[in-house]
Image: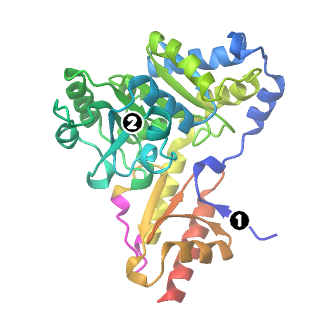
Amino acid sequence: MPLVIDLRSDTVTKPTSEMRRAMADAEVGDDVYGEDPSINRLQALAAERLEKEAALFAPSGTMANQLCVKLHTQPGQEVIVGHLSHIYHLEMAGIAAISGCQAYPVVCEDGLLNWPAVKAAIRPHDDHLAQTGLICVENSVNLAGGTVVSLEATNEICAGAHERGIPVHLDGARIFNAALALRCDVAEIARPFDSVMFCLSKGLGAPVGSIIVGSRRFIERAIPVRRMLGGAMRQSGVLAAAGLVGLQKMTTRLAEDHDNAKLLAREIASIPGVGIDPEKVRTNILAFDISAIGLKADEMVSALKAKGVLANAIGPYLVRLVAHKDVSRADCEAAAAVVKQVVSRSV
């Protein structure tokens, strides 16, 4: 069987052997009654790491994001989002379907929200206009190639929003990657936000799950909404056990993924006609533009797959690669060589 190098996403990571042992040995109880000790330990650790009062486990990042939107808003309001944000593009219009709100996408360079752009999007009080109920920031920004919003920008957004009585939610699916790029602790990123979601099932390598953190009152309100959305589970400590290993053991190795993504970016940038700036690759994600070489992104993805490299098209001419724990430096070097082969045969 030919070797497959899977660079589609860090969601494809497999649980480590330590995670599998922890799952098999997990102490469990009924989490709907609050009696699963493994879930309770995971939630306590997550709250401690991000320096928030409480935390709640959810089956997925999408559910966690949409749960937070619903808690922060009222039907008929507007939610300001980045134009490349996951919550806008890849969550099945959940803002409208679940919360009865409309998304207001703000266009910013490299997908990085800033306060002047957000401020301009906040609706004035007018009987004809939907009022701004929430601002959502993503960090890192997946569809922008893993770009990272600075602490200064997120602090300014939160301060300006709070002055106007508007809550701010952080889609921190890859917050540990963002913290590494910013050379700060995750708690520094999370501090000004009213709620934060982060994923256990991406760079941290757990098979399932995301965490919401916020005030104790916010998490108390989130529990019945999680149930309404179908996210209340019973002996879910078998999942929490893997998440605990991820949170305790896997954050320290993310630099390897960042280095591998930068290697890929440098190699691909050397290919004539391919558009990518390696200096902008700061986390484990990169995206390159092939509009100048006569191939569409889906054609490139198919050609790469035929040679054993899996990638994703995230636009008509934009291809995304994601480094993660299950691809080595040698894999990334081999994948870059395959990209060069495919491009050389198309020009």
Q: Is residue 106 above or below residue 296?
A: above
Q: Is residue 278 located in the magenta-colored stretch of the structure?
A: yes
Q: How is the image coloured?
A: rainbow
* Frontmost residue, 253 versus 312: 312
- The part of the image, by quadrant, that contains residue 323 is bottom right
Quarter of the picture containing the N terminus is bottom right
Measure how far apart labels 2 and 1 are at the Cα level. 42 Å
Magenta stretch in the rendered image:
269-279
Question: Dot 2, how many residues are within 10 Å of its Cα: few (below 14), some (14-19), or many (20+)?
Answer: many
Q: Say which amino acid is labelled 2.
A: Cys
Question: Dot 1, how many residues are within 10 Å of its Cα: few (below 14), some (14-19), or many (20+)?
Answer: some
The majority secondary structure of the magenta stretch comes to: loop
Residue 146, position as x, y percentages in the image: 42, 50
Residue 9, position as x, y percentages in the image: 58, 53
- State the SS at label 1: loop
* Frontmost residue, 283 versus 28: 28
Q: Is residue 82 above or below residue 76?
A: below
Asked whether residue 325 is in view, the answer is no
Which numbered disc, 2 or 1, marks the residue that appears first in the sequence?
1
Q: Residue at x 75, y 33 (%)?
A: 18
- State the SS at label 2: loop
Residue 302, position as x, y percentages in the image: 61, 74
Q: Is residue 300 above or below residue 125?
A: below
Q: Say which amino acid is labelled 1.
A: Val
Judged left or right of residue 69, residue 7 is right
Residue linked to disc 2 = 101
